[in-house]
Image: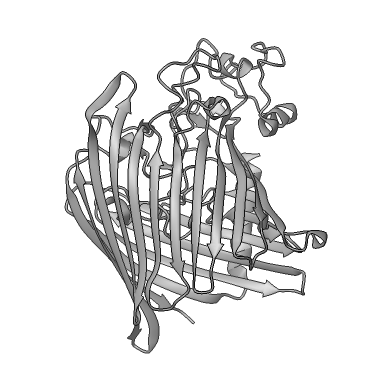
Amino acid sequence: MRLCATFFFLLMAFCALAQEKKAPSFELGAGISSGKYMPFWLRANQYGAVPTKESYATAAVSFSDFVQVNKRASWGYGVRALVNLAETRADVLLQEAYLNGRFGIFELQAGRKKQLQGLMDSTLSSGSIIWSGNALPMPMINLVVQDYWAPKFVQGIVGFKGNYAHGWFDNQRSDVSNFYLHQKSFYGRLGKPNGLFKFYGGFNHQVQWGGKLKYADPGNFSAKNGKIASSPKDYFYIITGQSMNVVGGDTATYGINDGWNRLGNHLGTIDVGMEIDWKKAKLFLYRQSIYEDGSLYYGNNITDGLHGVAFTQKADQGIIKVVIEYLNTTSQGGSVFNGSSVFRGLDNYFNNAVYRDGWTYNGMGLGTPMLTLDSETDLTNTDGTFYDNNRVESFYMGVEAKLGENAFMLRGSMSNSIGWFGQENIPAKKQYSVGLQWQRPLQLMGYNTQLKATLGADRGSWKPDVIGGNVSLIVPLN
């Protein structure tokens, strides 16, 4: 299955290259840091394009096309490839390479394509809890309803959207090879698209499943003889979230963990939101509640989640948008777990006993960047790909503005690292991070180029204080 997926992925990229390219561009840039880490708001939520560590130089090429076949059907493609050169390594990244076809309300996507999951501000948020755009896009086949669809008989008052996807995790991990992602989401809107008030609600469901262990497991805890369940029957259990304990606990077929639990690593968020849409501005309030080990079902981790307010002016100049967010992941259901509804704690967000590199892809976290990997801070003296900083409280503000032809984006955060149960940081370890991005059009040798520069700084006790910046020039090639 892995070989077929790789062949399909390469064929898809070749087909995209063979088409007439529209809107191609070339980007040349560099980033520099005063320490071994890049400033947080230079590298977070960049879809894996900016290294976590070291200064670097980068070159990228991107192009896309969109073809409207008729009123109901269209197709398109996109490619973005980049090279990062650092002192100790060179990374070649195919950040995007996808084909997509649309018929009616449905769109089928295949390949690597940027995406977000969850209710939040899509351009200025600190990052959705589960899927924030922090890691390199994962290759997947994804059936999507992109826009809220409303049946005619409800006259636009109720709308629905969602997706159903199958993805492939990377094989560079130290824990498991040849394993998959199952992803689905469903969101509803109450209120007409142009109405004053709109209410939103829904969920997303993510599962790491299947694969073969790379580590020793003599007691068959993680898998049965090193192989994790991946049959068609197992896939049904994956998508439904069926408890194997309910169906009898089959440790003759599965590892002990799966045989008495659920097959795979399940996580996601349940989201609600409200929007007030005035003539000249709009206000969006949202809340994401994380679930992973059953604590949310019993209400034990109800205080954990992402809370956000986004205010947007419908204007071309001045302050365009302000986003304020508060993230709390310190409860995790409490310090005790015994399987009952009363004690359903120790969730250990984004870590897993079977998939030991956790909720990561290509060495970077898939969820909110506020929860950091061992390799991203100096909180411990190791350098692994797992979350050693997932009990976090953070405050965030983002501001977007435009003055003339100059576009600005300011991000700032203050985060407390609480530490793990029984090993709390007293007082909490604080980290302050800020990033300021500036972009403007520039005439260069007859080309309408874009010049972009970002300054960032971190100060606190997670890692050594650092200051840095990056600059890039985006040149159209048509």
User: Horizontal and vertical percent for residue 92?
Assistant: 41, 55
Left/right placement of residue 336 relative to residue 433 reads: right
Q: To which quarter of the image does residue 472 belong?
A: bottom left
Q: Is residue 85 above or below residue 371?
A: below
Q: Residue at x 60, y 60 (%)?
A: 197
**Residue closest to the eye, 172 or 360:** 360
Q: Residue at x 49, y 74 (%)?
A: 280
Left/right placement of residue 101 relative to residue 206 reads: right
Q: To which quarter of the image does residue 183 belong?
A: top right
Q: Is residue 335 above or below residue 34?
A: above
Q: Quarter of the image for the N terminus: give it.
A: top right
**Residue closest to the eye, 158 or 425:** 158
Q: How is the image coloured?
A: one colour
**Residue closest to the eye, 325 or 392:** 325
Q: Residue furthest bottom?
A: 446
User: Horizontal and vertical percent for residue 117?
Assistant: 55, 49
Q: Is residue 253 above or below residue 235?
A: above
User: Horizontal and vertical percent for residue 378?
Assistant: 23, 36
Q: Is residue 199 above or below residue 408?
A: above
Left/right placement of residue 343 relative to residue 85 reads: right
Q: How many marks?
A: 0
User: Horizontal and vertical percent for residue 286?
Assistant: 50, 50
